[in-house]
Amino acid sequence: MSVVRASNVYKVFGKNGPDVVRKLEKGADRDDLTDLGTAAVIDVNFTVEKSEIFVVMGLSGSGKSTLIRMINGLWAPTSGSIEVAGKDISDMGKQQLRKLRADHVSMVFQHFALLPHRTVRDNAAYALEIRGVDKKTRQEKADHWLHQVGLEGWGDKLPGELSGGMQQRVGLARALAAETDILLMDEAFSALDPLIRTEMQDQLIELQRELGKTIIFISHDLNEAMRLGDRIAIMRDGRIAQTGTTTEILTRPADSYIADFIADVDRSRVLVARDIMATGSPDGAGLDGAASNLPTVAPDTRVCDIFGVSRDTGGAVAVIDNGTPVGIIDQAALVASMTPPGGNGGVGTAGASGTTSDKAVN
């Protein structure tokens, strides 16, 4: 069962919300309805599965931050429904929403949202304090998660004594200490310098391997989205333009907007061996012989690294998973993998008789 589900969700700001929704459902353009209200989210549908990192990305004004505020009940949809942990939150009262957030949902904000007069430890323990957990237990849990995010020994400091990157780690520790199964991250790393942002992305990936949280991550950075997301939803003008894995979006963009959006992505650093390999027949017949004398790479080897192996040997490369040949990559497939759909070649034709995998890159 999906952990989060959005069904035909609209959010219109203004007094005429229902009227705007009806006009949008009949095909009206939102730009023609600005006198009636601002349609921030329009007919959005998606599901998020357990332990998935689902990235919602788009440019400023696309509706992504409005969407996440509806997922945790800060704003109610004008129309449609949102289910979290199997419960429709659209009509929940304040008490029910508070319980839902306490039991199931934590949020990490872009600008940290730390309490400046409280210590780092007390900030990390704040959700547990609100829940009524005794002081000793909540401080022990706070110290544990501060250690997990690399802030051991900083518990007695005030937030103002920490760098921006360290403050964001406190925000992450606070969300993790709450021990909810869902994390909402609203451009959590966007305010950080590029190097610190990359470090935080690495840390999130590592923590996710251990914890298996369900994460909805809001971002305006395509490279960040493709690095973190099991699946990505790209928003435009309040609507979801495309939802898919990194591979699906790179190899099968839904329209010209998405194609232009991904045009400058360094495909060699996003696509991996499993995305471009020729797999042969469904049962793998013939791969053992073909792969026996070839250099090998793992299924998750990035294409940029495969180029080096292929260059050194001057030929094809075998893809080996736990000692078993699972695919072949020839030089033509490597070159084709760098060509966006619509150009000469394309990842979707990797190898003479092979197929491509759609598994996301983490």
Image (cartoon, rainbow, N blue to C red):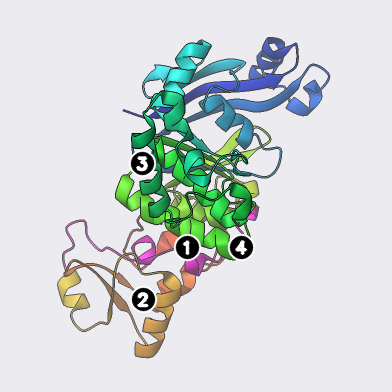
Image depth: mark 1 or mark 4 in front: 4
Q: CA distance from mark 4 to mark 2?
A: 35 Å
Q: Are marks 1 and 4 in contact (CB under 8 Å)?
A: no
Query: Which mark, by number, is residue 330?
Result: 2
Query: Which mark, by number, is residue 141?
Result: 3
Residue found at the very far right of the displayed protein:
35
Instruction: Quickly name the residue at label 1.
Output: 270
Q: Label 4 sits on what residue type?
A: Pro
Q: Badge 4: few (under 14), some or many (20 or more) residues near its Cα, within 10 Å?
A: few
Query: Which mark, by number, is residue 194?
Result: 4
Q: Nearer the viewer, residue 230 or 358?
A: 230
The local secondary structure at tag 4 comes to: helix
Q: CA distance from mark 1 to mark 2?
A: 18 Å
Q: CA distance from mark 3 to mark 1?
A: 36 Å
Q: Label 3 sits on what residue type?
A: Lys
From this viewpoint, is residue 306 visible? yes
The local secondary structure at tag 3 comes to: helix
Whole-percent x and y of residue 48? 41, 34
> Quick check: is 283 in the magenta stretch?
yes
Image depth: mark 4 or mark 2 in front: 4
First in sequence, mark 4 or 3: give its number: 3
Whole-percent x and y of residue 9? 56, 22
First in sequence, mark 1 or 4: give its number: 4
Q: Quadrant of the C terminus?
A: bottom left
Q: Label 1 sits on what residue type?
A: Val
Q: Which residues are magenta?
A: 260-285
